[in-house]
Image (tube, rainbow, N blue to C red):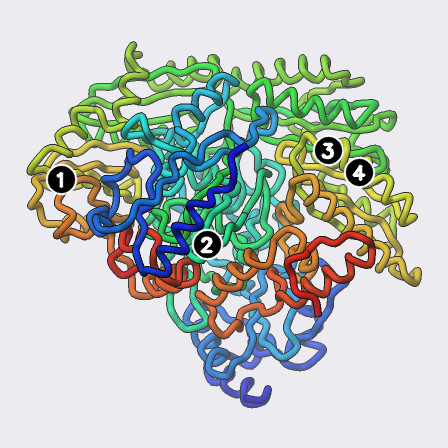
């Protein structure tokens, strides 16, 4: 049993006193994400040693672990019991921790079909900017006691509190998995992706790039077989490698996006939006709801953001020149006001990852 | 601003019939489905549009008048209980389905639309809205958002929070918040989750975009009888352990079986100590496989009878018993009090034993229905309000049940909300600092605390007093709270 992270509380108290911002960090696999350069002079608050699975009973479908627990260990344990994190979190590097996964709120290829990390967070224990240890939610599937602070923390980039412990709903691994490949134009691929969403088929991921559409089916063997017969397409062999490369951005497309002089944009939009005409290359996931865009670094951010907004969504600068372009899509004044007030309440001294999300807080 | 001035200012933009102030007109609004708590509002105002809501809120904000939003009034925790010096805001007239987009699998609706009406409208496209609270024929989607309502298919399909994409929300300060998006995520904090289940304390929801799902091809239902409720609980754990997530999994105890069988003749086995309903949905072959596996597990777990509904009519009949549990309680007892605790499933047998002991202690019968898949227990305490002291006994019994759920590592409410009813138990589940943060969140949206004041989150002094009451029972629960 580890002792409560006293050094974390001490660091927060000291930071409050010295008005010294803190940069919360687990395994550092998502250091690049958000306005990281805003925190280059901040002190490091290392959560990576706060590790360990606190509670896991497969028949309850709930796992509780400390924030610094490596994601790879967590997923290995679940795998050994035939279970998984259904939102397929991206690692980006092997050092990824559970805390970083929840704080960034990023989900992988399965997201459009089984839900995002926020859909599986049941409870959190956190340390807020006043050094208080707080618990919200719990280890049960249904819980409407109090506001849903656990989900509020998910994707808040550490700006409202330091995650200490997280309880997640887990799911059984599907019995069968099959990936189909189709040669298709963009409109043809979009049509198949919509069919996958509107018909009751066991689809667990879709990805379109370079005239190839990949559709992953997951579920009972019989369901996968029937769905394959219905959709057609050729089964591919190295399916795990392919989805792994999309999930963790090792696919050549994403590699190009993080190269010098290039930018990688993430456009999250209404799934039925027709192909976006923007300069650069695109990769489409989530049945059309996620469009990755690789452009030149100096591409006009305003144009990209207008396209995303017109399509009912938003655009994030994943990789690129973050010194001149805000990473996250601007908030409306009314929403910004609420964000600033929440920040003020949870972190009155403004020491937790300030400006990692928005320069205003 | 007195009530006459208030009425006058509302009438400037609302027809007379939309501004209610006479006691006889207000009477239908004095309570929600938790009728033990009753209160007439000062005025009830019935808007038809978002613009009218904005104008009403502006007047209340200026005049520091409390506002309590109300959907269909089917809530079970007194969340829509009116405020004596406040305005009640029933949203039932905002009842239009604005758009169904079958390609995007969404429906855009006003808050007063009934839950079931969405699925009925979507049926034309072979789709439906998944969360199905038992009151779905009457309850409104706005109320579902306020309470984060569930239903009998939550384990597989999630709660309201998992099935909505976007909200339009008016704050009491007059801001229109566009929360969520037509996309699967949106920038900034997850305010969609924060709003869901916030019990009308943070803002007034004026429009909701929900997700629709394609209807499964095949649905099949198994009913299993057990001679021991423990065995039924173990069967549930074994099914999940085997990697099966049934579409629905519901359990009833002996007293419930008898009450509902008498009422709806669902064909339940009266010899049983527990009945488990287990539903599979999906593609035909997949459902057949799953049913076969579930049957094998039920057999191995010691089920005394296993029946597969042979057709849709029989499936509906099996379900009818479970869905009639609440009215059946109303038939066998003049009154009943419905609880809503959640527990880690492994503690089911232990919790049920404790409830049985309490039932003897208080001299009140208790029926237990259980969303077995997700650990949500609905004990129905049977009592007679005409017998002096019985309501108080039922409330004390109920409070003890919630405390047992919290002790077992669960929650005091799974889907009915805290409302006015469970404020004391909130003191047990959350400490001083945690409750302070809840109040801080409230203040971020509603600095003057005008929206649904006094609900959902207890004031700190209330918890200190409640804690003091518990000390008398010999259990010091809140050493950190100052006593006064």
User: Where is residue A96 drawn, in percent x and y?
Assistant: 34, 31
Which quadrant, please, contains the C terminus of chain B?
A: bottom right
For label 4, the residue is B264
Q: Are marks 3 and 4 on the same chain?
A: yes
- What element does badge 3 sit on? helix
- What element does badge 1 sit on? strand
Q: Chain of mark 1?
A: A
For label 1, the residue is A263
Residue located at (42% from left, 37% from top): A117
**Which circle marks residue B348 in the picture?**
3
Residue located at (58% from left, 61% from top): B71
Q: CA distance from mark 3 to mark 1?
A: 53 Å
Q: CA distance from mark 4 to mark 1?
A: 64 Å
User: Where is residue B467 drawn, in percent x and y?
Assistant: 72, 59
Mark toward the viewer: 4 or 1: 1
- What element does badge 2 sit on? loop
For label 2, the residue is A131
Q: Is residue B127 something one can see in this rendering?
A: no
Q: CA distance from mark 4 to mark 2?
A: 56 Å
């Amino acid at each position: 049993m580890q002792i409560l992270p006293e050094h974390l509380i001490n660091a927060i108290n000291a930071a409050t006193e010295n008005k010294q911002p803190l940069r919360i960090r687990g395994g550092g696999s998502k250091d690049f994400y958000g306005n990281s350069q805003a925190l280059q002079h901040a002190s490091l608050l290392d959560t990576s040693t706060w590790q360990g699975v606190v509670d896991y009973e497969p028949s309850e479908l709930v796992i509780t672990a400390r924030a610094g627990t490596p994601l790879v260990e967590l997923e290995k344990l679940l795998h050994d019991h035939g279970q998984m994190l259904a939102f397929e979190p991206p690692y980006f590097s092997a050092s990824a921790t559970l805390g970083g996964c929840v704080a960034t709120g990023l989900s992988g290829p399965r997201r459009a079909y089984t839900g995002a990390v926020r859909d599986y967070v049941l409870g959190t224990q956190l340390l807020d900017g006043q050094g208080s240890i707080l618990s919200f939610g719990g280890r049960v599937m249904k819980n409407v006691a109090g506001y849903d602070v656990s989900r509020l923390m998910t994707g808040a980039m550490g700006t409202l509190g330091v995650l200490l412990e997280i309880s997640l709903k887990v799911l059984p691994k599907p019995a069968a998995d099959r990936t189909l490949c189709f040669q298709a134009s963009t409109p043809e691929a979009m049509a198949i992706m919509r069919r996958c969403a509107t018909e009751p088929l066991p689809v667990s991921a879709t990805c379109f790039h370079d005239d190839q559409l990949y559709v992953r089916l997951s579920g009972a063997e019989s369901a996968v077989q029937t769905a394959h017969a219905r959709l057609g397409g050729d089964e591919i062999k190295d399916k795990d490698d392919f989805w792994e490369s999309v999930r963790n951005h090792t696919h050549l497309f994403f590699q190009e996006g993080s190269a010098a002089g290039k930018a990688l944009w993430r456009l999250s939009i209404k799934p039925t939006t027709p192909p976006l005409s923007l300069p650069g290359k695109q990769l489409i996931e989530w049945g059309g709801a996620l469009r990755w865009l690789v452009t030149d670094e100096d591409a006009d951010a305003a144009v990209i953001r207008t396209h995303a907004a017109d399509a009912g969504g938003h655009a994030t600068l994943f990789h690129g020149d973050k010194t001149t372009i805000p990473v996250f899509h601007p908030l409306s004044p009314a929403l910004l006001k609420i964000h600033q007030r929440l920040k003020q309440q949870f972190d009155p001294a403004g020491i937790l990852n300030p400006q990692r999300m928005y320069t205003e807080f | 601003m007195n009530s006459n001035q208030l009425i006058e200012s509302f009438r400037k933009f609302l027809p007379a019939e939309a501004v209610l102030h006479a006691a006889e007109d207000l009477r239908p609004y004095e309570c929600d489905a938790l009728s033990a708590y009753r209160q007439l509002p000062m005025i009830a105002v019935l808007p038809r549009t978002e613009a009218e809501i904005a104008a009403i809120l502006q007047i209340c904000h200026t005049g520091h008048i409390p506002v309590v939003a109300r959907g269909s009034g089917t809530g079970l925790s007194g969340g829509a209980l009116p405020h004596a010096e406040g305005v009640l805001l029933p949203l039932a007239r905002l009842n239009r389905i604005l758009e169904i987009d079958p390609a995007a699998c969404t429906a855009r609706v006003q808050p007063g639309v009934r839950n079931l009406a969405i699925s009925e409208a979507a049926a034309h496209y072979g789709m439906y809205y998944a969360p199905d609270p038992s009151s779905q024929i009457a309850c409104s989607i706005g109320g579902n958002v306020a309470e984060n309502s569930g239903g009998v298919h939550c384990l597989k399909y999630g709660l309201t929070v998992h099935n909505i994409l976007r909200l339009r929300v008016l704050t009491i300060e007059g801001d229109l918040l566009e929360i969520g998006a037509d996309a699967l995520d949106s920038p900034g904090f997850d305010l969609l989750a924060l709003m869901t289940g916030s019990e009308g304390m943070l803002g007034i929801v004026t429009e909701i975009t929900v997700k629709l799902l394609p209807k499964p091809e095949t649905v099949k239902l198994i009913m299993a009888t057990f001679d021991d409720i423990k065995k039924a609980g173990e069967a549930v754990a074994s099914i999940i352990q085997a990697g099966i997530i049934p579409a629905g999994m519901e359990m009833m105890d002996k007293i419930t079986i008898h009450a509902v069988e008498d009422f709806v003749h669902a064909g339940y086995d009266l010899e049983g100590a527990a009945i488990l309903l287990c539903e599979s949905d999906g593609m035909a072959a997949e459902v057949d496989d799953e049913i076969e596996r579930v049957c094998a597990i039920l057999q191995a777990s010691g089920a005394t009878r296993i029946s597969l509904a042979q057709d849709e009519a029989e499936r509906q009949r099996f379900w009818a018993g479970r869905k009639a549990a609440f009215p059946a309680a109303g038939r066998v007892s003049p009154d009943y009090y419905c609880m809503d605790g959640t527990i880690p499933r492994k503690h089911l047998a232990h919790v049920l034993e404790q409830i049985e002991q309490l039932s003897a202690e208080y001299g009140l019968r208790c029926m237990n229905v259980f969303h077995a898949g997700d650990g949500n227990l609905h004990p129905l305490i049977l009592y007679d309000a005409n017998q002096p002291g019985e309501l108080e006994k039922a409330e004390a019994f109920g409070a003890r049940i919630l405390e047992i759920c919290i002790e077992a590592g669960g929650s005091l409410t799974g889907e009915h909300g805290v409302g006015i009813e469970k404020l004391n138990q909130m003191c047990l589940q959350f400490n001083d600092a945690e409750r302070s943060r809840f109040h801080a969140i409230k203040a971020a949206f509603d600095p003057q605390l005008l929206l649904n004041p006094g609900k959902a989150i207890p004031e700190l002094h209330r918890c200190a007093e409640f804690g003091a009451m518990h000390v008398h029972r010999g259990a010091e629960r809140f050493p950190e709270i100052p006593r006064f």
